[in-house]
Image (tube, rainbow, N blue to C red):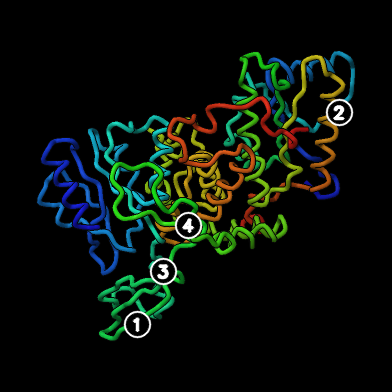
Amino acid sequence: MEESNWEPKVIGFLCHWCSYAGADLSGSARLEYPHNIRIIRIPCSGRVDPMFILRALQNGVDGVLVSGCHPGDCHYQSGNFHARRKFAVINRLLKYVGIEPERVQFSWVAASEGPKMAQVIKEFVEGVRKVGPNRLFKDEKKDGE
Amino acid sequence: MENRLKEEAGKLLKEGKVDYIVGYGKGTVNLRTSPLITNKEEDLEGLVINPFIANNLSRYPVELKGRVGIVVKGCDSRSLTSLMQDKKVKREDLIIFGIPCEGVVDLKKLAGQIGAEIDRVTDAEKEGENLTLQVDGSKKTIPFRDVIFDKCYGCEHPTPLEYDVLLGSEVTPNLDIEKSLEKIKALDDMDTPERWDYWKEQFSKCIRCYGCRNVCPACFCERCFVDVNMPQWVATYATWQDNLTFQLIRTLHVAGRCSDCGECERACPVGIPLRSLQRKMVEEVKDLFGHEVGIDKDAPPVFSHYEATDPDEFMK
C-alpha cells in the first residue's frame, strides 16, 4: 500500500465480560469508532500472554490494544489483578527495547462503558497513526528486493 | 576455606545426610572452574574455592533428585531462594555452603587487561585488593576490582542470605551501582528507535544455541515455549526477529525471579549483552512491586500474587 493512503491496522484483545461487551454496547448505541481495529475476544485480560502482543507486532499490525474489566470487577475474581502486574512489566520492557509506547496500550473498560470504548479505540488509533506504519520487524534488505 | 568445605562435605556424604555434593571443580582450561557434581567421597578432593567460581550452581538441585549439599555465592543463594519460592526445591532437602564473595573475575575483562589469552596465565592468586598473575612466566599485578563482573559492582548481598555453613566471615557490600548499571544507563539515554536498532543488531548475532536459557536457574519450565510447535511461537531457525522475540519473552518469564547472576551473558557465545535486559527488569520489578529477588523464601513469587494497590498509571 502506498504511504499516502496508509491506514493503521490495530488488534484489540478484549475480555469477554467487560470490554467486548462494552464494544458491543457502543455498536448498539450506534456510536462510531474507527474501523481500523480488529477485535479478538478473550476470556479474561489475564489470558493475554506477552507472546500475543509480540507476535502481533512481528506479524505487522501497527498497534495492539488490550482491554479488560476494571480492577475489582473481574468475572474470575482476580484475573485482571494478575494481568495488571504482567502488563506493568511488559509495558516497561517494550519501552526499554525501543517499541514506541503508542503501539501498545492497556485499558480498563466496563460492559456499561460503550462511549468510553469508542473513545479509547479512537484515541488509540490516532496515536498509532501518529507514529506511523509498524516497520519494527521489517527486514529492510529483503523488502527492498 | 577449601579444606573446611572438603571436610564438611565429606562428612555429609559419609553420614548419608545428602545424596550429592554440588560445588566447583577445576576446569579444563587454566583459571576456569566448572561444576563438580558427585556422590563419591573421593571426588571431593577436587573441590575448589577461588575468585574464578563464576557458575551459578543453584540450577542443579532442581534436576538432581534427592538431597543436595550445594556451594553458593551471594547471588546464587538468592537464585536458590527464588527457586524455593517457586517450590522447585525444598529447603529441607538442601545443605547450603555459603561463600562470602568479594566478586568474581570476568575472564574476558582479565584477558583485556593483560592483553593476552587466558590460557597464558598459569597461576592467579588474590592478595588483598590485587590479583597476582603469572603470565608467560612473569609476574603481573592488577587491581582485583578492575576485572570483576559488572554485576559484582552492584551486589548488595555478597554474603549468602540463606546458608547452613558459612565458609569464611561475612563480607560488607562494596557498592558502585553506577558502574554496575553503566550499559543500562547508556541504553536509557538513547532515543526509542536507536534502542530498537541496537537490539536488532545485537540479536542478529544470536545463533539460538539456547545457552542463556539452559544456564539460567530461573528458566525451569518443563517445556520451553520455543520448543512448543502447536502453536509454533518462534521459528526453529535463527532470524533476528524471532531471536529478539524469544529473548524478550524469556526476559518476561524470568522477571521477578532473576537475581542478576549474569550467567546468561556469560554463557552467550556471541557476546550479546543479555544482562542489560535482565538487570533492567530487576530494577523495574523492584520499582513497580517493591519485590527484591531471593530475600524471603516464604514470600510468594511476584507474579502469582497481587495487591489491590499495584501501580496502574500506565493503564488508559
Which of the two marks, 4 or 2, is nearer to us in this view?
A: 4
Callout 4 amino acid: Pro
Residue B140 got which mark? 1
The answer for how far apart the CA atoms under marks 1 and 3 are is 17 Å
Which of the two marks, 1 or 2, is nearer to us in this view?
A: 1
Badge 1: how crowded within 10 Å, few (<14), some, or many (20+)?
Answer: some
Count up the numbered dots: 4
Q: What residue is disc 3 on?
A: B108
Q: Judge if badges 4 and 2 mark residues of a common chain.
A: no
Front residue of B165/A71: it is B165
Q: Secondary structure at mark 3?
A: helix
Residue B108, x across and y down, in percent? 41, 69
Q: Earlier in the sequence, mark 4 or mark 3?
A: 3
In the displayed structure, A8 sits above or below B32; it is above
Q: What residue is disc 4 on?
A: B173
Determine if residue B313 is in view.
yes
